[in-house]
Image (cartoon, rainbow, N blue to C red):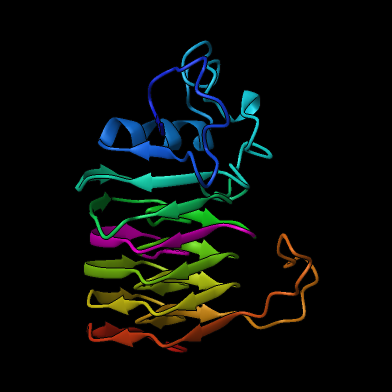
């Protein structure tokens, strides 16, 4: 039996595991994850319950590293989940569903503000109306993890650097994704899949199997209009 992310089941066993994932069926469940990562959960509410990361036998830390989530429904949502210094490092299976995403301002914005090393977001559709400053994307503002088999439509707009349809700034792996969104950036580094693919020699990108991660974009398609300035 999977744990619905928003119900406190004290006898649910190793919820959040691959065989017993957290289930997200509606907006309030995704808001619970957002509030935990963003640090806005009220004391004694989400963060104090048995499905919170701090008491979870599967999740390694507040980033939900090692934990699994499955989306079982399509709905509207206001992001982002996490951000600068607040990565999501779990496995998020969109299960072919669609999130209608609205973000009106901010930096490090997308459905996930920051996908950390070891994080994987996949098989997800996003209909986006996203506006931000820098590190702006549909799936992620910045990704050091993996994004695969995701599709973004709508509009992505950034007022500064690093604006992309899938990820604004990529230091991980983007694979098999499609961007149909129109992407606009007012300054540098604007792209259909990612605004910037950082292939530098940083040593902090090591996955859970101790493999070095090289930033790559493979088997992706862009059909959206791209509008940028110098360096785009």
Residue 7 point in image, percent of width and height: 38, 20
* Residue 88 seen from this side: yes
* Residue 81 seen from this side: no
- Which of the image's four quarters has the C terminus? bottom left
| Viewer-nearest residue: 196 or 160 | 196
Does 128 lie within the magenta span? yes
Q: Is residue 126 above or below residue 85?
A: below
* Residue 167 position by quadrant: bottom left
Residue 164 point in image, percent of width and height: 39, 74
In the shown orientation, is residue 132 left or right of residue 25?
right
* Residue 33 position by quadrant: top left
In the shown orientation, is residue 74 left or right of residue 177?
left
* Residue 171 position by quadrant: bottom right
| Magenta residues, start to end | 118-137
| Viewer-nearest residue: 23 or 33 | 23
Residue 203 point in image, percent of width and height: 80, 71
Q: Is residue 17 above or below residue 52?
A: below
| Viewer-nearest residue: 114 or 176 | 176
Q: Total of numbered circles in the picture?
A: 0
Q: Is residue 224 above or below residue 131?
A: below
The residue at 58%/31% (across/down) is 14
The residue at 58%/49% (across/down) is 87
């Amino acid at each position: 039996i999977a744990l619905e992310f928003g119900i406190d089941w004290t006898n649910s066993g190793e919820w959040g595991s691959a065989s017993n994932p957290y289930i997200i069926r509606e907006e309030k469940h995704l808001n619970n994850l957002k509030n935990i990562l963003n640090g806005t959960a009220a004391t004694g509410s989400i963060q104090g319950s048995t499905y919170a990361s701090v008491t979870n036998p599967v999740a390694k830390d507040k980033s939900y590293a090692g934990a699994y989530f499955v989306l079982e429904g399509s709905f509207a949502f206001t992001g982002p989940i996490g951000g600068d210094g607040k990565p999501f490092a779990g496995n998020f299976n969109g299960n072919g569903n669609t999130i209608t995403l609205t973000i009106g301002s901010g930096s490090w914005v997308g459905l996930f503000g920051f996908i950390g090393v070891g994080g994987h977001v996949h098989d997800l559709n996003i209909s986006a109306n996203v506006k931000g400053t820098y590190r702006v994307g549909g799936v992620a503002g910045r990704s050091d993890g993996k994004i695969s088999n995701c599709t973004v439509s709508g509009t992505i707009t950034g007022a500064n650097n690093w604006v992309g349809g899938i990820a604004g700034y990529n230091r991980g792996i983007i694979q098999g994704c499609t961007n149909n969104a129109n992407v606009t950036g007012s300054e540098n580094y604007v792209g259909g899949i990612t605004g910037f693919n950082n292939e530098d020699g940083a040593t902090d990108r090591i996955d859970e199997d101790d493999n070095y991660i090289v930033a790559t974009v493979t088997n992706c398609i862009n059909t959206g209009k791209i509008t940028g300035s110098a360096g785009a």
